[in-house]
Amino acid sequence: MTVILYIAMGIALLTTVIALTRLNAIHALLYLITSLLAIAVVFFLLGAHFAAALEVIIYAGAIMVLFVFTVMMLNLGPPAIEQERRWFVPGMWAGPGIFLLMLLGEIIYLVYNLRGIETSGTGGSPSEVGVSLYTTYLLGIEISSMLLLAGVVGAYHLGRRAILPVAEEPTRPLLLTEGRKS
Amino acid sequence: MFPYPLIWFVIALPLAGYIVLALTGSRMPHRAVTIIGAGTVGVSLALALLISFWYFIAPPPGLVYTDTLWTWVRVGNFTPGIAVYLDPLAVVMMLVVTFVGFLIHLYSVEYMGDDRGYSRFFAYMNLFVGAMLILVLANNLLFLFLGWEGVGLCSYLLIGFWYTDLNNVHAANKAFIVTRIGDTSLAVGLFLLFTHLGTLNIQEILARAAAQWPVGFGLAIATAALVLGGAVGKSAQLPLQVWLPDAMAGPTPVSALIHAATMVTAGVYLIARLYVIFQLAPPVMLLTAIIGAATLLLSATSALVQRDIKRVLAYSTISQVGYMFLGLGAGAWSAAIFHLMTHAFFKALLFLAAGAVILGLHHEQDIFRMGGLRKSMPLAFWTFLIGASSLAAVPFITAGYFSKDEILAGVWNAYGGTGHLLWVAGLLGAFLTAIYAFRLVFLVFFGEERRSPEKRPGLLIAVPLVILAALAIGGGWVQIPKTVAGLPLFGHFLHGAFTLARTKTDAGAPGMLAGAAAIASLGGIALAYLLYLVLPAFRRRLAEQPIWTAMGRFLITGWGFDWLYEWLIVRPYLWLARVNRDDVIDLFYRGVSWTAALSYRGLQAAQTGNVRWYAAGVAAGALIILAFVVYGL
Amino acid sequence: MTPIPLDLGLLFAAVLFLLGALGVLVRRNIIFMLLSLEVMFNAAGLAFIVAGSRWGQPDGQVMFFFILTMAAAEVSVGLALVLRLRHLLGTLDVDAAATMRE
């Protein structure tokens, strides 16, 4: 079992790295989906079955699909890939790389104290999770549903005007007395 | 008790006039300004006359009236009050100030009538009269110092009255700065007096000093010397006499009031008030006499060659105040005050008459461009002649003769042998005075007329001139020495103020000496007559000799003091200021602004608007916070 | 279902997180930045799961659930913004949106 775990972890890391270094957005997304699936395996092996299912269904299945649709809608063709190629200078990775290596070093130092502790092999069954959600964390559920509502409204509002041609966009903030044309 | 409390009104009315005129004068009609400006001083004069009259008839007990309005400062032992002290000396000074002041205010109504700054002028003049009255009536040295500073301020304001001309501004600055040196000396003297005698009340100081300090005591010498320094500054004596000739840049009424009759005599008054301290410091008294003698000779010689009519009179003032200092130094207190009074009359008269001439000739002040005005300006001629005669101390018929004679008599008796030397200096000075005074008369009023007067003086100029002329003649008859007729009213009167005086002020000199003074004065007039009227060609040939031209150049600058001070003090000081422009203290303030600018630039660099830059910032923050956590463990 | 060393799990999550951060800082295309952001969210969720597994309690999964919800809302709004930005600037270059500078 541990072997499968290590393989899954390795795939997740590898595909994430590859995803971040692609020039084509769709390619990157596909690699990222692969990474997410690998992580779902890791979840499963940790005993968090419900989380694994959620990862596949919602994260890989809804969020990433949304990404793919948006990228398709943006119609990024070869010119975009050309642009990415121009921007993709290896030298740029040096600065943030060193930075984040330092951060990694600090985290390693912090995690160092937790050597020798092992996970318990189970992360709670789905029913336990459900019960916990609706009793202990009920408030959290309600708030996140509001968050989703806010997201829906925001996305709807922001997405609405994208259909209008550029010329009709207001060039100055509208006064209260001026109505909106729509 | 009756009229004495009114003395507060004598002081307050001019000050109230100042406040009203300062706040609303520019919006008031001309006539209202006149009424307030001259009227307040007029009412003040009336009250002063009333009080003086009562003082003569029914003097208060001990010849002193004192009243305190409130305690100005109350810090431990230090409790000077707003208080007046009325004794014979104060009465004399008060009368001089209000009387001459009012006459000059009347004169100014006509003289300054066309000036745009009419209300400003009267505001300043009123403030001056108020401050001068505070000075002479003050009970304690702090209140006196208030008046002292006040007159200094008004002098500055009035010299630079026509401030659009930079020369006037420079003259005003010069006057103020030079007298400031004296003021500082005076202030230190006041500090010393308070520290060692515990009070600033004048009479208290005199009593305690007389009781506690022996003659020749070091502290007395120090204090007296410091007070002398202050007096020297204000009264334009050596070495601080350089400001007075330039102060003639102000309007003529200002020169008459401030720089002839009153402010320059403040120093004399101060020394007279603190006479006990001076008596306890014989070296300082000798110094005073020497300063007086030296100054009177220096300025008399300088007056001989001046071209500007007002500058002649300015040097003359310095010279006459030198006489007063000479008198003070010799211990002839009331003689000095007597000369102060007569000088106020005839010098104001001279200035006002000169003003009438200047006004008539449309602001011409060069005497070599005047001439023959005897016929066309008779009023100015006669009044000027009377003033000049009084200045030259023409015997018996002028007030100047009696007062100068008193001083000379007092000087002869002082210091044993040295007194004779000072007497000779005084005599020589009288001779020179007569020469330059009548040089003026002959050059301006005799000879051929080069410019005709365009304006005849009106009533408001004529009346003050006539009154002052009468006083310049008769003002001396209040003190006729024993050698003549023996009517020493003035000395007797003032004796009440100088109860602790050690010198006998009415000893009188041998008759031969009085005769010598008369001869000096008449001789001077005769010489002037010869040189300027009878033999003008001879004089001109004489003047062209190289020795006389060189000496003339030296004398016309007042013995080169301006040049000396310029190179000794002014330039080094300006150099120092220039070098010190970016000094250490400045560094602090510039450092503050530099730091602010630096942090601004730094923060500005952080606001790039670039999202990735901000993301990097967040990451850096996380790094740092984690570092705190890590290293804090 | 098998126990694994805790530090390994947390380290794995940390490495994923830092990889995502690297992507955010380096990539210039907004889409890729959002992508990297998703990687970071995921890594955080992974850390919670690992921690929950350590104690054997469902709290880890509950937190992961909330993170997921939040990521979903954020992505939808974020992508809508990307569309608007693309419309306004004509490009997906995030540096072109740097108009709020000094």
Image (cartoon, coloured by chain):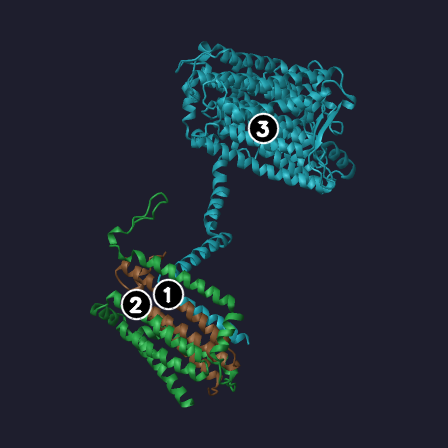
Chain colours: A green, B cyan, C brown
Q: Give the quarter of the figure containing the N terminus of chain B.
A: top right
1 vs 3, front mark: 1
In space, the residues marked 1 and 3 are separated at their CA atoms by 76 Å
Q: Three-letter amino acid code at disc 1? A: Trp
Residue B312 in the image: x percent, y percent? 50, 24
Q: Chain of mark 2?
A: C
Q: In the rendered image, which residue does mark 2 sit on?
A: C29
Q: Nearer the viewer, mark 2 or mark 3?
A: 2
Query: Can residue B419 be seen in the rendering of this structure?
Result: no
- Residue A157 is tagged as none
Q: Residue furthest left?
A: A78
Seen at 33% across and 76% down, the residue is A32
x and y, in percent, of residue B421 in the image? 63, 30
- The residue at which mark 3 appears reads as B264
Say if labels 1 and 2 share a chain: no
Q: Position of residue B140 (x, y in %)?
A: 70, 32
Same subunit, tags 1 and 3: yes
The span from disc 2 to disc 3 (Cα, nearest Å) is: 89 Å
Q: Is residue C96 above or below residue B286?
A: below
Cα distance in 3D space between marks 1 and 2 = 14 Å
- Element assignment for label 3: helix
Q: Chain of mark 1?
A: B
In the drawing, does residue A101 fall left or right of residue B72? left
**Is residue B72 shown to the viewer in this render?**
yes
Corner quadrant of residue B358: top left
Question: Of label 1 and label 3, which has the lower sequence position?
Answer: 3
Q: At numbered mark 1, what does the secondary structure look like: helix, strand or loop?
A: helix
Of B452 and B429, which appears nearest the observer?
B452
- What chain does mark 3 sit on? B
Q: Which mark is residue B613?
A: 1
Q: Are marks 2 and 3 on the same chain?
A: no
Closest to the camera, between mark 1 and mark 2, is 2
